[in-house]
Image (cartoon, grey):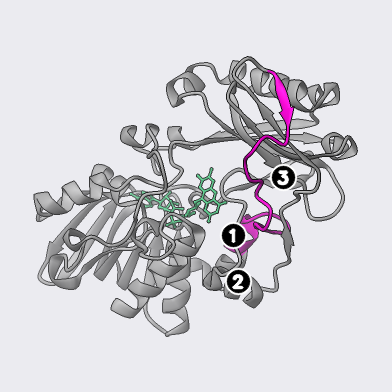
Amino acid sequence: MKRTDVLIIGGGLAGLSLADHLQMRGRDWLLAEAQEACGGRIRSASLAGAPFDLGPAWFWPGQHRMEALIRRFGLQVFDQFSQGDRLFQDNTGSVYRNRGYASMEGSLRVAGGMGQVVTALLGALPDNRVMTGTAISTLRQTDGRVVATSANGQIEARRVVLALPPRIAAETISFAPVLREGTMKAARSIPTWMAGQAKFVAVYDRPYWRDTGFSGDAISQKGPLVEIHDASPSVGGPYALFGFVGWPPEVRAQHRAETITHAIAQLQDIFGAALGQPLATEMTDWAQIPTVATRRDREGPSGHPAFGLPLELRDLWEGCLHFGSTETAEGFGGYLEGALESSERVSKAI
Ligand SMILES: Cc1cc2nc3c(=O)[nH]c(=O)nc-3n(C[C@H](O)[C@H](O)[C@H](O)COP(=O)(O)OP(=O)(O)OC[C@H]3O[C@@H](n4cnc5c(N)ncnc54)[C@H](O)[C@@H]3O)c2cc1C
């Protein structure tokens, strides 16, 4: 059995950032990540030779923890491309210029993709403390220690941090002694931000939309893509658009190929014929990833929920058990900044 002071469950931004805090304080810690790679909802994939974000792409001015992290690792930041006309497609498929909605002007992106932040954080941590492919299924508290079980064996820790969405923790981990019903209910009631979404990226040799005076921003009532933006690298190509897929998760899952075909055809209808021939496409359907989304997350919340750490998720197992994903952040809950905010809070608490 492995032994440590603090076991972090989840290698998304919150878990990695907590590991970073503990490492800098000289604390003893281990991190268990269910998937084969860290990053959680952050995922940058190489398409046609360049990295594109299939999870988060933006952070915003005033998110000081993100700014500081990016500065510390010397990563380059650039503005979301937003020059040119925006487009609106109504439910009959007709397309109009500049019909009232805001673009993502002012949003900031990381050169090389948001995955750069994960790579940089991992580079600052000792490899032998990060265990990927390690899904924790059971937590048992005995004599002031907690024993975590995964298919790879057991880890004993003095404190455990659930750096994963509270809903995923409640639905996929068994707790002994069982957590109070109020705690389980509160954890299950917190939606996992963006977990019901699918993101589609189409890569092109030229920014055809820019060439014809469009920013790449579009809203559609027709779908399958309901919100589209430029996703090109900071400099040069290949160029890309991304869109959030509005078709329900069940339809996307059963008709994946058709969803992609319709998405390409829709880009062609909105921006012009050249968009019908992408160099590469990719769709990541977060609603189908069991370490991110539960069945309840397939129906996303209607707006941005008021996140934070409910009373029911505090003071668990005499202070041995802590919740710490972005969904537990008071200020920027749901966002990348919220993941950093939560890790800061937990680091202070333990
Ligand atoms: C499509 C999409 C677009 C987004 N866009 C933006 C954006 O532009 N800007 C922004 O600020 N935010 C955005 N977000 C939200 C952002 O991704 C999250 O705020 C952030 O990544 C959450 O980090 P986290 O570490 O709290 O959780 P997660 O990234 O979910 O990390 C939790 C980790 O726990 C692991 N795990 C789960 N169960 C177990 C288990 N039993 N044992 C071990 N490990 C486990 C998971 O595999 C995962 O790696 C977006 C999200 C999505 C899906």
Give the side of residue 36 with respect to residue 161, left or right: right
Quadrant (top left/top right/bottom left/bottom right) for the N terminus: bottom left
In-front residue for pair 48/232: 232
Spot occupied by residue 162 in the image (x, y as percentages of width and height): 31, 59
Residue 279 marker: none
Q: Residues within 10 Å of mark 1 (few under 14, many from 20)?
A: many
Spot occupied by residue 306 in the image (x, y as percentages of width and height): 34, 54
Give the side of residue 184 with respect to residue 207, left or right: left
Instruction: Indicate the amino acid at tag 2.
Output: Glu
Identify the element where label 2 is drawn: helix
In-front residue for pair 6/66: 66
Name the residue tied to disc 2.
67
Name the residue tied to disc 1.
59
Identify the element where label 3 is drawn: loop
Cβ of mark 1 under 8 A from ligand 1: yes
Instruction: Indicate the amino acid at tag 1.
Output: Phe
Please provide the residue range marked out in magenta.
94-119
Spot occupied by residue 311 in the image (x, y as percentages of width and height): 18, 63
Decide which of tag 2 and tag 3 comes sooner along the chain: 2
In-front residue for pair 238/214: 214
Give the side of residue 288 with respect to residue 100, left or right: left
Give the side of residue 7 with respect to residue 104, left or right: left
| Residue 157 versus residue 138 in the image, above or below | below
Residue 231 marker: 3
